[in-house]
Amino acid sequence: MEFIKTAVAWFLGLGSTVIVPIVLMILGFAFKVEAKKTIRGAVMTGVGLAGLFLITDLIVAALEPAVGAMATRLGLSLTLVDVNWADAGIAWGWPGVAGVLLITLIVNGILISLKVTKTLWVDIWSYWHGSALAGFVWALTGNIWWGVVAGVVYLTIGGFLGDWTAKDIQEFHGMPGISVPCGTTVQAGVFAKLITKVLDKIPGYKDWDASPEGIRKKFGLFGEPVIMGAVLGILIGIAAGYNVQQILGLAMQVATMMVVLPRMVSIISEGLIPIAQGVIGFMRERFGDREIYVAVDCAVTLGHPSVMTSTVILYVVAVLLAAVLPGNKLLPIASLAVVPFWVGSVVPYTKGNVIKTVLIMAIYMIPVLYIASAVAPVQTQAYSMMGQFTEQIAGGTLLGSFDMGGDPLGFLIQNVMRLLGLGA
């Protein structure tokens, strides 16, 4: 078991930009996709992911301090320390990680063979969401195996949610044959799919036209994504109290993101789609019209212009919500990094309408903030058992996050464990 754990840790240490191409190559060769398409497609996908993460990291690094400065000017000081994707440290470091990965792969293989699910859960990197939840349950119950069970259940449910949203993702983002089952991203998509049906019954709601195309028609030059990005950067810079030099720098960084990020997603599509179509072709040759969806990283949904336009607005909305919601303890700053990935799964249901996207995401963030506040003690205990953030925890600090801390499905699973008498 120790050997398996070491091997898994080494493989995961390669990072998603290496893991994803390796898995795609294995998948391509296993499903008899032409070698040239497989190798080129896998490498192109890795290149696109690397470029995408560089751009995403750039804008998060630029906007986090600006939003933080805005929160300081508003006098906000909430009690939880936002650790956001530091939760990946729990996911890849807790003692049961190898069990979560291996058992999930086996369960997914069985469900595929029985035709119970269509999502082939090959996006190994995104297993980290389930493994982080497993680490939380380990902290809650004190039992590694209950953590493994929780992680496998979480990822298996994510696969079913991926099935349910796959066609919407494929059609809107132009990526046939894929599924995006990862973590809170797919949950945001499911939430949007459900609530859109309710909101569409409001008189006049359906007629709102705030898509990038509609905005461009109404506002001309100022409706262009690159100009919108620059304007949003200027407004946030002013709200943060920046000087002219800092405001102009932020404006150019946001504008750069609006132009470059969709190009990176097009590179991912160029590499990914031939392999996904090859897998689908293989399955159809042998099993008739059997549909299989290839699970991919949620980063592939970031390319539509409405995604980052909505995201920049939502950065401000998230802070304002945290300020006004009674009983909330988390001020999301580091956690803002997860917002674009949520939005990427929501825009298929708003058809890229920026106003509708911001409204739906604002509603979604309300329970997420409260869940993050409620889960913080267990999350902090997990870090304590991992030997991380020891000084802060010893000083009485509680740790929280938007993503895994505020995860609705993870919260449900934790409370089922409590109902079974397995946790405090």
Image: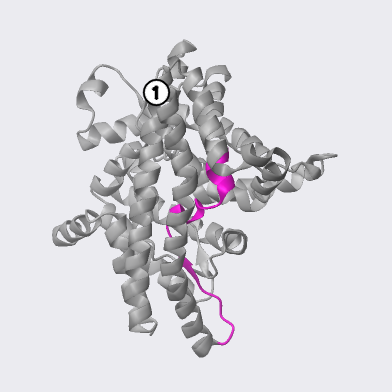
The answer to whether residue 325 is above or below residue 261 is: above
**Residue closest to the far right:** 203
Q: Is residue 86 above or below residue 376?
A: below
Under mark 1, the amino acid is: Gln
Q: How many marks?
A: 1
Q: Residue 229 appears at what percent x and percent y? A: 52, 37
Q: Nearer the viewer, residue 315 or 322?
A: 315
The answer to whether residue 330 shows anywhere in this view is: no
- The residue under label 1 is 246
Q: Residue at x 46, y 64 (%)?
A: 269
Quick check: 310 left or right of 404?
A: right
Q: What segment is highlighted magenta in the picture?
A: 288-310
How many residues crowd mark 1 within 10 Å: few (<14), some (14–19), many (20+)? some
* Callout 1: SS: helix
Residue 166 relative to residue 182: left or right = right
Question: According to the image, what is the colour scheme of the structure?
Answer: one colour
- Provide residue 410's location: percent of width, then percent of height: 46, 43
Q: Is residue 118 left or right of residue 197?
A: left
Residue 114 part of the magenta segment: no
Query: Which residue appears at 65% of the width and 35% of the height?
Result: 359
Q: Is residue 34 in view?
A: yes
Q: Residue at x 53, y 85 (%)?
A: 284
The quadrant in which residue 390 appears is top left
Residue beneath the point at 23% across and 46% down: 93
In this rendered view, identify the residue nearer to me: 223 or 172. Answer: 223
Q: In the rendered image, which quarter contains the N terminus?
A: bottom left
Q: Is-magenta flag for residue 295?
A: yes
